[in-house]
Every structure is written in structure tokens, then in C-alpha cells.
Amino acid sequence: MKIRRYCYLIALVLLSGCTSPLTATPTLPPAPVATLYPTNPPPAPTTAASTNVPDTGWLAGRPGIELRKLQVAQNGQPTSLVIVRIDPAAVRLRVAYTPEAPRALRSWFSDTGALLAINGGFFTAEYRATALLVSDGEVSGESYAGFGGMLAVAPDGSVSIRPLRDQAYNPDEQLAQALQSFPMLIFPGNVPADLNDNGERTRRSALALDQTGRLLVIAAPGASWTLSELAAWLSQSDMNIDRALNLDGGSSTGLYVRDGDLAEAIDSFGPVPSVLLVEAK
């Protein structure tokens, strides 16, 4: 991630990987904040996600963790999706953040011993998160205002994803973990976001909640999806998604899972400073 711009471009340019996507009529930040845009990434590494199985169905790991791999037609070509479905009550969710020591997702995964790791939100040239982030109760950065969304974990372990245009972050609220990103792909009630998409296709990563409160961790390792296409596909899928939030895709996209016979390895193409971890209780 090498070419830098400013957040005022958020209203003009769709983040593709590290390109800035928006919902309709966002409220922009009051001042420019540096963000990153990706160079063209190298070819995706060969992973288990390249399987020719059209749909594995939900493969069970320990109670509360399921893995599903799909091959779907996108832009006239087959492309893969990897989705992990998690019962938040059965695991512990953590946001890890080390701007002074960013690293590839495979290193995050091996260093932490987590069951799952996925890349976090957008960051600056200095590997600082461009928005608010809470790691083990410690707050960093400033909240997006009027756009984007936030994954939040309360002290009791309950998990939410909320659009910040509808419910702004309150500095007085107690959060154990949180990360912000943008845009919202699906608003509460399974309403696809009205995205002003520039048509660029790249790797994607996202988080979602289904209608029963399970967390869906989503990676699309092939450079096949526009944001609006991913939002539409998720909304129309059989996963009963209630809401979904885009993460920093492109060269940052990565997803590692290891739980018994469940395994997946999609590495980021470069270092990332923040990740969402799923750990055993």
C-alpha cells in the first residue's frame, strides 16, 4: 500500500482494497486525514480457497465455529468466497493493534495462536488506523463521523455492527474491543447500501451479522468484486444477513483459520497494523 491521498477524496474516489467507498450522502470528516491506496497486488497465492467445490456447505469445527467455501460466478468467471460463521458467545473476540510493528496476516496468526485472524480497517502511511479502534479497552484514533460503521464488543462479550450515520460513537460508552471501517455494505434489516461504485474489482474482506446475531467473517481472495456487487450478493445470499461492513481489502485482504479439521490460509500481500482475532475461551 504505497500511494497516499487524503480523506477528502472519500467523497470522490471508491476505495478498492484501500480505495474509499461510501454510502450515499455521507458527512465528511472536518479535516483531511491521510489514508492509503493500493498499488496493483501480485497474483494471489494458491490457497484452499481455490477449491473447485461449488459449495462445501457449513463445515463444523468446535461449537460456535463453522467454515464455508463457495465458488460463485462473478463477472463471467468463477471466483471464491470463504466465510466463517461464529457464535460470539462461544469464543472471545479481540482487536489487536501494533502500528509500530505491522506484519503480514500469517505472522499475526502464528504469533497470537488465535483460532482465526482477519485484517482490520484502513490505515495511514505510518500504519496508524484512520478511525477509532479499541484494543483490550484502550482507545486509539478518532471516530468516523456520519459514514462508515463500527464492530463493537461490549465488556460482557456481546457483539454489534452499527452504521455510524445512525448511531455515532459516544466516548462515554464502555467497549472492550472495537474497529471502524467503511462503507457499510448492508444496513440493518438487510438493506443494501446505495454505493457510488467506480467499477474497480479487487480482493475484498468484510464482517457481517446474521439475523440470529452470529458473526460472519468474509474474505474474497480473487480480484473479482466491486463493492456494490459484493453487497448485492451478500444481501441475496442464503445466510440471512442483517448488516455488513466492508474492511480494508485489496492487498490487505487476509483470513486465517485453524480449528481441528477446519483450515484456511489467505495471506495479505503486505503488512497490516490491526486485525480482528477470534480466540478460544
Image (spheres, grey):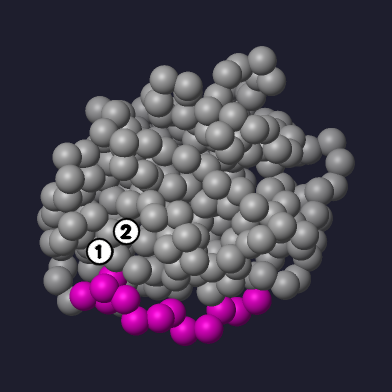
What separation in Å lies between label 2 and label 1 (alpha carbons)? 5 Å
Quadrant of the rendering where the C terminus is positioned: top left
Residue beneath disc 1: 263
Percent position of residue 127, x then y: 71, 58
**Residue found farthest to the right:** 31
Residue type at mark 2: give it: Val
In this rendering, the answer to whether 40 lies above or below 97 is below
**Sequence order check, earlier mark of 2 and 1:** 2
In this rendering, the answer to whether 124 lies above or below 150 is below
Which residue appears at 64% of the width and 52% of the height?
98
Between 144 and 142, the residue placed more toward the observer is: 142
Quadrant of the rendering where the N terminus is positioned: bottom right
The boundaries of the magenta stretch are 39-51
Residue beneath disc 2: 257
Q: Indicate whether residue 147 is drawn in magenta.
A: no
Tell me whether circle 2 and circle 1 mark residues in contact (CB < 8 Å): yes
Percent position of residue 192, x then y: 42, 40
